[in-house]
Amino acid sequence: MAGFDWLLLTALTWGALALTAWAFVDAATRPANAFVATGKLTKPGWMGIAAVAAFIIWQFGLMSFLGLPAIIAAIVYLVDVRPAVRGLPRGNSW
């Protein structure tokens, strides 16, 4: 039987993986010119950051030396970049 600590850490790790996957998929579905128009890092840059963050959490865990910066990167995308990019219209406006 697993202890409470193990269950909590496992749930937090899977939640962090889901968060980084959400950031990656969201960045992939947004138009590339929206990132440039809002003055944010480019689309491939954010997709790369989210992919590396997910890889770090998967390989080393959430409580590793790089786990905290990885989850912070995904949170920065979702809290700062996503609302700015989401506010712009997609494709042709006519």
Image (cartoon, rainbow, N blue to C red):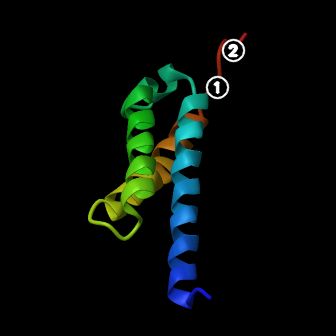
Amino acid on which the number 2 mark rests in the picture: Ser
Amino acid on which the number 1 mark rests in the picture: Pro
Which residue position is annotated with label 2?
A: 93
Left or right relative to 83: residue 36: left
Left or right relative to 34: residue 1: right
Residue 73 placed where, x, y %?
39, 52
Residue shown at the point (56%, 47%) measured from the top left = 21
Secondary structure of the residue carrying numbered label 1 = loop
Residue 24 placed where, x, y %?
52, 40
Residue shown at the point (67%, 12%) measured from the top left = 92
> Dot 1 surroundings within 10 Å: few (below 14), some, or many (20 or more)?
few
Which residue position is annotated with label 1?
A: 89
Q: Residue furthest right?
A: 94
Say whether marks 1 and 2 touch (CB < 8 Å).
Answer: yes
State which quarter of the image contains the N terminus: bottom right
Secondary structure of the residue carrying numbered label 2 = loop
Q: How many angstroms separate mark 1 from mark 2 (CA)?
A: 7 Å
In this view, the residue in front, 76 or 37, is 76
State which quarter of the image contains the C terminus: top right
Q: Compared to 22, does 10 lie above or below? A: below
Residue 47 placed where, x, y %?
45, 34
Residue 64 placed where, x, y %?
32, 67
Q: Which dot marks residue 16? A: none
Q: Compared to 22, does 31 lie above or below? A: above
Q: Residue furthest left?
A: 65
In this view, the residue in front, 87 or 15, is 15
> Dot 2 surroundings within 10 Å: few (below 14), some, or many (20 or more)?
few
In this view, the residue in front, 43 or 57, is 57
Q: Quadrant of residue 28?
A: top right
